[in-house]
Structures are given as structure tokens and as C-alpha cells.
Image (cartoon, rainbow, N blue to C red):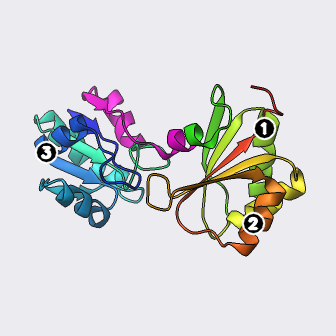
Amino acid sequence: MIYFVPTPIGNRADITLRALDVLREADIIACEDTRHSRPLLKHHDIDQPLVSLHDHNEARRLPELIAKAREGMNIAVISDAGMPLISDPGYRLVQACIEQEVPYTVLPGPSAVLTALAGSGFPCHAFSFDGFLPVKKGKRRKALETAIESGKTALFFESPHRILSTLEILTDINPELPVCVARELSKKFETYHRDTSSALWEYFQQHPAKGEIVLLLDTSGGSR
């Protein structure tokens, strides 16, 4: 069996009892970055063999993991934080499991996307998540315009180094658009900054953003 196991997005205590059981009983734990995951596993007294599984080696690693699962080994797959596959490695492995009829399961657990959505105060009945915004400004603007036209709450991951530029683009598109910048979710300095795009652009010019960010846009036009 191959298990896709969510891990905490910040607070190490945010891991389920089932996830801990699976990780302790796994024959192998495939990690996005073994150096990143080792401290979390050590914190929970887990000392199983680790292998790397990331975007650059996933295709090459697939035959090995599939073969070990066929031999009867239990393999746990984790990313650096949150739910595997969500802007993280794992998609190719799931596809291989389906195609080759290898049993797999996905455990429920932490997700920065759903945490930010629930904490933003924006409508949750219809939303979209489009991963990381493009680096190039032109493509980023187009992605933001498309999201605004959707009428749904739109979520993106964004770098603290680009958030000011992104808020400037949003201000140019619609200075009154309700925006939430969710930072450092589940950590000590967690914050939800909610205001119009223009107000947040002004705020972050004076208070440079730090940490991991989920950007949310309320494109519902006030409807609930």
C-alpha cells in the first residue's frame, strides 16, 4: 500500500494520530526533502528509512516505489508541508498507482489552502485554487484578471518577495477589491490582513511581508 500523508503546515502538533501510525509503520517514507522532514519525524520519534521524492526525480523514482509496494512494503509519501500533490510532488505516483493497479490511499489532514479559506472570512461555497502565481508580471496580471472574472473566492500561493508587486497589479485592476493576505498559518506570527487591494498595497509598502503567504481574492461582488 502507498499512503499519501499530510504533514503540518507550521505547527508540529497539527498531525493526526492516524498519520503518525502510518509513518511509524511504514517500511519507507518518501519525502520531498529529507533534510526538511527529518526534524518533524524526529520530533515524533519516527526513525524509518527515508528516500527523496521531488519534482526532479519523481519520474525516475516511480518504478522503484511501485516495485516495493508490489513486494508488500508499506510506503508513506509526505511533502514539506500540508497535503502531498497540492503544488507538491506526488501526481505522477498516483497516476502510476492507478495505471498499474497498486493500492493507495490519501489521509485527510492539514492544508494551507483550506485553512486560509476558512480563516479569511471570504465566501467558501465556491472557490478556486491555482497554485503559485506566475513570476512574470504580464502572466501574473492575466491570472489575476481571470480569477477576478470568475466570481469565486480565488486562492494563490505567493512569495513574500512578490506580494507587493502583486498587490500593485490588483490595485491597478480594481483598487476596491476585497483581498486577504494570510501569513504564517498555524505558526506563532500567523496573521490575516483583510482590506481592499489598494489599502493592503499601501500597508505592505510600509511593512514588508515575511513568511509563507496565501493570497485570497473575494470576487463575489458582495454576494453571500
Q: Give x and y (percent) for residue 211.
A: 53, 65
Answer with the quarter of the image where residue 98 lies: top left
Q: Is residue 5 visible?
A: yes
Q: Which residues are magenta?
A: 91-116
In the figure, is residue 15 to the left or right of 156?
Answer: left
For the residue labelled by badge 3, is the local secondary structure a helix, a strand or a loop?
Answer: helix
Q: Which label is found at residue 203?
A: 2
For the residue labelled by badge 1, is the local secondary structure a helix, a strand or a loop?
Answer: loop
Q: CA distance from mark 2 to mark 1?
A: 21 Å
Say which amino acid is labelled 2: Tyr
For the point 78% across and 38% down, which residue is it?
A: 219
Say which amino acid is labelled 3: Arg
Q: Earlier in the sequence, mark 2 or mark 1?
A: 2
Q: Label 2: how many residues lie within 10 Å, few (<14), some (14-19) or many (20+)? A: some
Tell me the residue that label 3 is attached to. Answer: 24
Q: CA distance from mark 3 to mark 1?
A: 43 Å
Say which amino acid is labelled 1: Thr
Tell me the residue that label 1 is attached to. Answer: 219
Q: Give x and y (percent) for residue 187.
A: 44, 57
Q: CA distance from mark 2 to mark 3?
A: 45 Å
